[in-house]
Amino acid sequence: ETGVTQSPTHLIKTRGQQVTLRCSSQSGHNTVSWYQQALGQGPQFIFQYYREEENGRGNFPPRFSGLQFPNYSSELNVNALELDDSALYLCASSLEAGHLDNEQFFGPGTRLTVL
Amino acid sequence: TQLLEQSPQFLSIQEGENLTVYCNSSSVFSSLQWYRQEPGEGPVLLVTVVTGGEVKKLKRLTFQFGDARKDSSLHITAAQPGDTGLYLCAGISSGSARQLTFGSGTQLTVLP
């Protein structure tokens, strides 16, 4: 059984650029959530995708967008990058959105640095 | 906006000591989880507590959910260097997304 994988591991961009981060969910999981973790902070919920549709969104501007594909892998896109977007971006997959004790399995994250 | 506050933010102790980490909120959560995160990795789930007043034990770790489901604590007995890491509490909302609201974390260092 393959765990959650993310690519790339590290990324450096400049202000104003656009970035796409990728996540492969754990086998059998149809739900993917994305989180932003700034240095020294806990992760903050960006949004969740369930069966290819957005199923909830945190307090992030529209320049943060996402996709989920038929194989349940997912992308996070960020447009017009700002310095404050520098963070570890975590992807988590789970078996089924809405379950009471739904365990989310996290990938190792993508470290994004915006210069 | 639901917020979770963790204390202390940093904790450095000697091997063999006991410690308690606290997680407090003004909001009620349907359930609460504790994670541990190591450098370069994503958080790993330790436990989920669902019922107010619930106590769960995982070897040397004891987790408690407050009666009002607004707060929780993690107690480690006889800490070991392998316990070193960032401990995060996360409340689960009752909405369809079951989104996690994380605390800011407690960085624990256990010195040999």
Image (cartoon, helix red, strand yellow):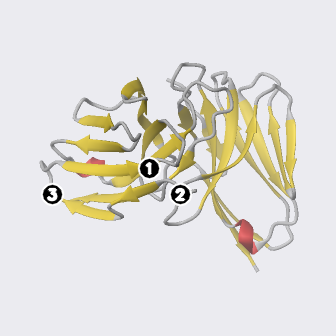
Nearest to N terminus: mark 3 or mark 2: 2
> Is label 1 in a helix, a strand or a loop?
strand
Q: Position of residue B25 (x, y in %)?
A: 64, 29
Neighbour tally class for label 1: few under 14, some 14-19, many 20 plus, Cα within 10 Å = many
Side (left or right) of A7 relative to B11: left
Task: Give the label, 3 or 2, closer to the camera.
Answer: 2
Asked if labels 3 and 2 share a chain, the reply is yes
Disc 2 designates what residue? A2
Name the chain letter of the residue that bears numbered label 1: A
Residue that numbered label 1 is attached to: A90
Residue at (77, 42) in percent of width and height: B73
Where disc 2 sits, the SS reads loop
Residue at 25% x, 42% y is A77
Task: Give the camera-side residue of A37 and B111.
Answer: A37
Q: In percent of the image, x 63 and y 26: which residue is there?
A: A99
In the image, residue B97 above or below residue A9: above
**Could you tell me which quadrant the C terminus of chain B lies in?**
bottom right
Query: Quarter-wise, where is residue B27 in the image?
Result: top right
Image height of B60 relative to B12, above or below: above
Nearest-to-viewer mark from 1 and 3: 1
